[in-house]
Every structure is written in C-alpha cells, then in structure tokens.
Amino acid sequence: MRNREELFKSIQLKSSFLCVGLDPDAERIPASCGTGVQGMEQFCKSIVDATHDLAVAFKPNLAFFEQYGSEGWAALERIIDHIPKDCMVIADAKRGDIGNTAARYAQAMFEGLGAHAITVAPYMGEDSVRPFVDFRDGCWTILLAMTSNPGAQDFEFHGNPPLYERVMERAQTWGSPDELMFVVGATRPEAIARARTVAPDSFFLVPGVGAQGGALRDVVDAGWNAQCGLLVNSSRGILYASSGSDFAAKARESAWSLRNEMKAILQEKTNG
C-alpha cells in the first residue's frame, strides 16, 4: 500500500477500513496463551489469524514489546512477519527527534522492523519529521495531530487556530497525502470535521472508537473523503473481547461486527 490509491483499493477489496491495534497487556492476556514474551507472541499471532481478513492494517504498540528488551523485540519481528502481506503494518512508536537520530529511527522502523508506517510526534518541527517522510517512497509517516486522551487539552487545542490545526496545515508542506497521515482521535467529532477541512485529501488514523467512547458513525460523518480517508483503530474492544480460551473467536466476532458496520457505510457512500 504505497499510496492512497493502493490503500483505498485494499479498503474496497475487504469492505473495511479497520486497523487492529496490537497492545498485548500482560495482565490481560488469557492464561491459555502462556506467560511472558511467549504468551504475548502467541496471543498476538492468534489475534492476527482471527482478524486479518477483516482488517486492512495492524498497529503494534512498541512499548508492550520493548519492555522485554531484545527478547520482546525479536517477538515483535516474528509477529510482523506473521501478518499477511495484504495488511499494512503501523509501528506505533511515537518517535520524535531531529537529524541523524530521526533518520536512524526511520531506518529501524522501515528497514529493521519492516513496518509500512510509523507514528511520529511533530513537536520539534520540520527537521524532526522530514527524515521519516524522505526515507523511502512507499513509507508512511503518521503525525500526531488531535489525539483522544484527556491531556490533549493541555496543548493541542490551544491557540487560534488551535495547535493541532497548525500542525496539520504546516506538515502538508513537508510531504504529500501519499506520504503523510494524521492521528485524529474519535472522541471529538467536531474537531475531526475541522481537521478534515484543513487536510481534505489525507488519511486519518483514528483511535478511540469503542472502549474510549468514540462512535464509528460520528467519525465517518465528520471525517469521510472521496477515498474513505479513514483507518479506524480498535484495540481493547477486539483484543480483550474475552479473557477465556475462546479469546480469538470472540476477537473475531468483535472485529466482524465493526467491519460489518464499515461495509454498510462503504456501500452507502459508494451508492450515494
């Protein structure tokens, strides 16, 4: 999925714009998977097996793997290798630094890990983002813009226009909509609508649907564009649909339900 056109074709093929977040919390992984790194790896691979035909992307959160050091990183590499090639892999790393450091982060994610995209914090400005955007054609940089956490109010909504809008407007001079996406949280649909006005052609990675209180229809009404323009992430609602040995089957049920909502929306938008 080297550009928006390829990503949209995948969305159409699967009738889905679902991204499954892989946040394997050791305290919530079912006992049937085992413990430690081995249990985490088994859990994530089972989730991938159960949902990959319903999702266009998987988003492993690196913190859950890095806590185990080299052993956790090796497990992450194996999990990514296990993800089918028709799914985008988003490294949820939230990196943000300048110059050679940013370039090395990009190399670690895109070449070392084999991710197609990485989340990046843009606070340090253009020279902290360009090493990711310029690294190689076909790699996506996903900038934090308007997040779904309560602390987003501390900085992101300050100013006129608010900071998140300034970030999005300025960042579009650093890369095209085929290179840059933006994280836009699901819990503030009115801000999603403003974000879509600022970046009409860009894809948004949207966390916060389900467990955090965001509603899919609200996200779609506020953020849709001609190529869908949305990757809606669900983590806890899918991963922990059951704490028993049936966790994978229940994860699939949860993903299936969300994907069916997406399928209906895609049909509605296409026929409309």
Image (cartoon, grey):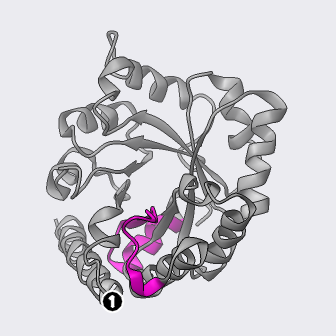
Q: Where residue 239 sits in the image (x, y, percent)?
A: 35, 71
Residue 69 lies, with reference to residue 257, above or below; the image says above
Mark 1 Cα-neighbour bin, 10 Å: few <14, some 14–19, many ≥20: few
| Type of amino acid under label 1 | Ser
Q: Residue at x 56, y 29 (%)?
A: 122
Q: Residue at x 64, y 68 (%)?
A: 76
Name the residue beneath numbered marker 1.
245
Residue 152 location, quadrant: top left
Q: Which residues are magenta?
A: 6-33
In the foreground, 39 or 206: 39
Q: Is residue 136 visible?
A: no
Question: Does residue 189 appear left or right of residue 153 in this picture?
Answer: left
In the foreground, 163 or 36: 36
Question: Does residue 23 appear left or right of residue 206 in this picture?
Answer: right
The N terminus: image quadrant: bottom right
Residue 77 lies, with reference to residue 96, above or below; the image says below
